[in-house]
Image (spheres, rainbow, N blue to C red):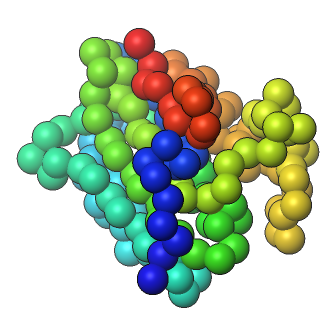
């Protein structure tokens, strides 16, 4: 059984990628990938990361293509870092939700968890290297690396809060 939380208690991160911007990656030119298809392919890998007492909910529409120019390795690493961050935030179990959708030329991937929220003392440095709070593993590079991936792909990684842990989507 998972901890019961109101939807307003969820932590949200929104990873946005520009679907129109071709980019170059460390291994050459990025390919056009379908975010929904890639998230579905990653489902098993992400599921294996979860300890007992955690669930992964992937909300994508398989028939809807969300294309972006992206390096698959960079994309997978950014999603993996965000999943690790959510796991670390819920030592007693909970749920991670990943939603892929399009908003104009931006493809957004919203990742939420039922963890306790981000401590006020690190919110301002959240995407800076070595920002960490109470983690047993890691040194605080995951969110900085995931954000740089988003920026390199013409997007951004943001925590949008309204009220207690609630996020609004990018305009």
* Residue 121 visible (yes or no): yes
Q: Position of residue 72 (x, y in %)?
A: 45, 48
Name the residue located 83 percent from the left edge and 69 percent from the top edge. 137
Q: Position of residue 50 (x, y in %)?
A: 54, 76
- Which residue occupies the foreground of this view, 1 or 96? 1
Q: Residue furthest left?
A: 63
- Which residue occupies the foreground of this view, 9 or 138? 9
Q: Position of residue 146 (x, y in %)?
A: 64, 41
Q: As displayed, is residue 8 above or below residue 16? A: below
Q: As displayed, is residue 142 above or below residue 123? A: below
- Which residue occupies the foreground of this view, 102 or 96? 96
- How many numbered discs, if any? 0
Name the residue located 48 percent from the left edge and 67 percent from the top edge. 4
| Quadrant hosting residue 121 | top right
- Apparent side of residue 80 relative to residue 148 in the rendered image (left or right): left
Name the residue located 30 percent from the left edge and 21 percent from the top edge. 103
Q: Residue furthest bottom?
A: 52
Q: Position of residue 163 (x, y in %)?
A: 58, 30
Name the residue located 51 percent from the left edge and 19 percent from the top edge. 154
**Figure quadrant of the C terminus:** top left
- Apparent side of residue 5 relative to residue 152 in the rendered image (left or right): left
**Figure quadrant of the N terminus:** bottom left
* Residue 81 visible (yes or no): no
């Amino acid at each position: 059984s998972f901890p019961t939380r109101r939807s307003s208690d969820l932590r949200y991160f929104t990873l946005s990628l520009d679907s129109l911007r071709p980019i170059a990656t460390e291994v050459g030119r990025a390919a056009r990938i379908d975010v929904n298809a890639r998230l579905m392919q990653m489902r098993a890998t992400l599921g294996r990361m979860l300890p007992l007492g955690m669930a992964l909910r992937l909300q994508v529409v398989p028939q809807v293509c969300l294309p972006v120019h992206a390096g698959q390795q960079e994309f997978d690493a950014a999603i993996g870092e965000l999943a690790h961050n959510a796991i670390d935030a819920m030592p007693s179990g909970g749920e991670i939700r990943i939603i892929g959708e399009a908003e104009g030329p931006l493809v957004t991937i919203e990742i939420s968890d039922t963890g306790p929220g981000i401590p006020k003392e690190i919110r301002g440095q959240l995407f800076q290297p070595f920002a960490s709070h109470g983690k047993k593993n890691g040194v605080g590079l995951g969110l900085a690396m995931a954000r740089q991936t988003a920026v390199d792909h013409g997007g951004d990684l943001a925590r949008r809060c309204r009220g207690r842990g609630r996020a609004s989507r990018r305009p």
